[in-house]
Image (tube, rainbow, N blue to C red):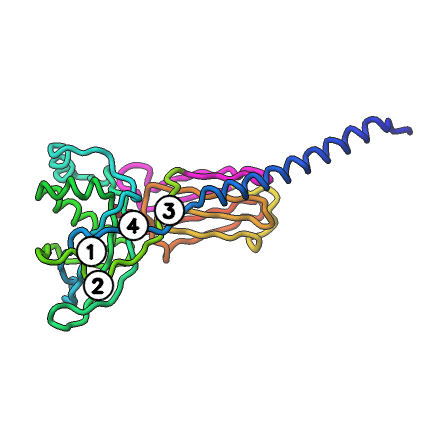
Amino acid sequence: MTTDSSLLNSELELQQQEELYQQLLLQSVGKLQSESPSSKVIRPKPGICVKTVLEGNKEKVFVNICQSNSVPPPPDLSREELVELLQSEDPSGYRVPMSLGEPHSEVDNNSQCCSAYDVVINQEFFQSCQNDPLFQQFVILVSFEGLENKYNLELSRDWKVLKNRKFLGSISEQNIRTKSKPVIQELLSQPEFTLLVEPPDGDPEYLIAEIRLPGVPSSGSLLLDLGEDRLVLTARPSLFHLDIFHPLQVDQENSVAQFNKSTELNSDSDDGPVEL
């Protein structure tokens, strides 16, 4: 049996072209990542300082609501729409983009130790809300809810906006993400994924991400990073990279992941009630 050498040469050329394509693709991805970083450091401007306490132990807490145009604004909202939103049974359809800083220990005017949190929202949105007490209360409320969801707190709704202080402590830099859309970076292959919520109707309690990873032999080659609203999965060496943002907030501590060897499926189930 003889073999046509021209066929072998064609297959070799195709293989070489494929290898060259993958090299160029990896170089292009690296260049895009360096030119378009996914986050940047900002120094917000002071806004208002809100005084409240923790429910239970009544520990004093200060919330510094700051402003920066590096944070995107929320969708336009009229006063009439805000009233309807606050009166609705499910106000979670409207979200205010914000950056939540880490807690820092401070000393109040009575030389007592207390905790302070920094919340950064869009500067133009912040300024417009100061002209209407209802909008200001709405900003304070969503800031409290954001901190409660992230740090497992319960803040008293009996708050006070300090008149002569815009910030407690010192303004710290914050690292915010610059990518607002889901990003899937194709390296050697593009992973297929599906996002599901349970139950499918009503308020979701679970977010389930199913990611198909053909060619990945075990979970030992996977790096999975789960944030409140972001999922990043990398399969080494440079097989897959998945970086997506989802519209829900999940309980990171109670999230679980499973790898199915027979289907080469990595399933990340984000366990926890959705509270926006």
Residue 168 is situated, as x and y percent measured from the top left of the image, at 18, 61
In the image: residue 261, left or right of residue 142: right
Q: CA distance from mark 4 to mark 1?
A: 12 Å
Residue drawn at point x = 32 percent, y = 47 percent: 249
Q: Earlier in the sequence, mark 2 or mark 4?
A: 4
Q: Would you place residue 22 above or below residue 254 in this image?
A: above
Which residue is tagged 2?
A: 169
Neighbour tally class for label 1: few under 14, some 14-19, many 20 plus, Cα within 10 Å: many
Circle 2: element type: loop
Q: Which residues are magenta?
A: 182-211
Which residue is tagged 4?
A: 99
Which numbered tag is attached to residue 119?
none
Q: Is residue 119 visible?
A: yes
Q: Quadrant of the N terminus?
A: top right
Mark 2–mark 1 contact, CB under 8 Å?
A: yes
Circle 3: element type: strand
Is 244 or 213 nearer to us in this picture? Answer: 244
Which residue is tagged 1?
A: 64
